[in-house]
């Protein structure tokens, strides 16, 4: 852009100092890596599709259904515990719980031992809806895993835990480099 014969330069802020270049995968492993990534993406996508479909059948959102089934399975949880279990920020879960409370699906109840702690509890309506949904992604995945031997299950757990830790490390490193910590 020119103004009276001079060039104006626009300065932009770098979000990331340099684009991240993933490490090269040896070509002899690339087909297997691609198949593993595709399998993980399939499981994730299928889980979300099933959750949304089931949620829609009872006029809920996917996250609301996830919370209902989590509370049904493990019982009352604090907001922090719930956030950790469904892998979401406290602020996100607070919004979900606010809407669920307005729809009489959950209530907040102070701990009798520590008044600073607030537990999220299912109401009768929430319990009824949760019981009425027989199949959920967790059940489907558990059923699929039951086909593995005990040794295969231990190996899979070890491998998935290693991958999850590595992903967490990469995400934290990159978030720290961008100044986008939350």
Image (cartoon, grey):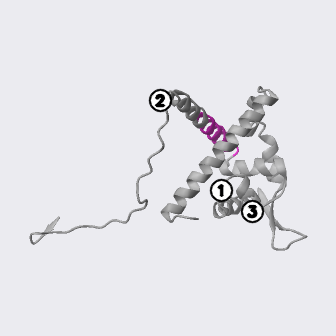
Q: Nearer the viewer, residue 116 or 29?
A: 29
Q: Tell me if mark 2 has few (under 14), some (14-19) or many (20+) residues whose alpha carbon lies within 10 angstroms of its own.
A: few
Neighbour class for label 1 at 10 Å: few (<14), some, many (≥20)? Answer: few
Was residue 48 drawn as part of the magenta stretch in this picture?
Answer: yes
Q: Nearer the viewer, residue 24 or 19?
A: 24
Dominant secondary structure of the magenta stretch?
A: helix
Magenta stretch encompasses residue 54? yes
Tell me which numbered mark, 2 or 3, is placed earlier along the sequence: 2
Q: How many numbered circles does the render carry? A: 3
| Quadrant location, the C terminus | bottom right
Kind of element beneath mark 1 = loop
* Residue 88, label in figure: 1
| Label disc, if present, on residue 79 of the rendered structure | 3
Q: Nearer the viewer, mark 2 or mark 1?
A: 2
- On-image quarter of the N terminus: bottom left
Q: Which segment did they paint magenta?
A: 42-58
Check residue 27 in the rendering and tell me which mark sits there, or answer none: 2
């Amino acid at each position: 852009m020119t103004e009276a014969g001079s060039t104006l330069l626009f300065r932009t802020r770098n979000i990331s100092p340099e684009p991240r270049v993933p490490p090269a995968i040896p070509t002899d492993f690339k087909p297997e890596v691609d198949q593993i990534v595709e399998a993980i993406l399939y499981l994730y996508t299928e889980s979300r599709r099933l959750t949304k479909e089931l949620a829609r059948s009872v006029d809920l959102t996917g996250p609301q259904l996830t919370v209902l089934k989590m509370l049904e399975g493990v019982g009352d949880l604090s907001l922090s515990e719930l956030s950790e279990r469904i892998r979401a920020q406290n602020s996100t879960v607070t919004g979900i719980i606010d809407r669920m409370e307005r729809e009489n699906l959950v209530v907040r109840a102070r701990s009798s031992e520590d008044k600073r702690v607030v537990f999220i509890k299912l109401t009768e309506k929430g319990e009824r809806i949760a019981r009425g949904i027989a199949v959920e992604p967790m059940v489907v995945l558990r059923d699929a895993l039951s086909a593995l031997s005990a040794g295969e299950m231990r190996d899979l757990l070890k491998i998935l835990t290693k991958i999850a830790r590595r992903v967490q490390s990469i995400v934290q490193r990159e978030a720290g480099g961008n100044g986008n910590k939350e």
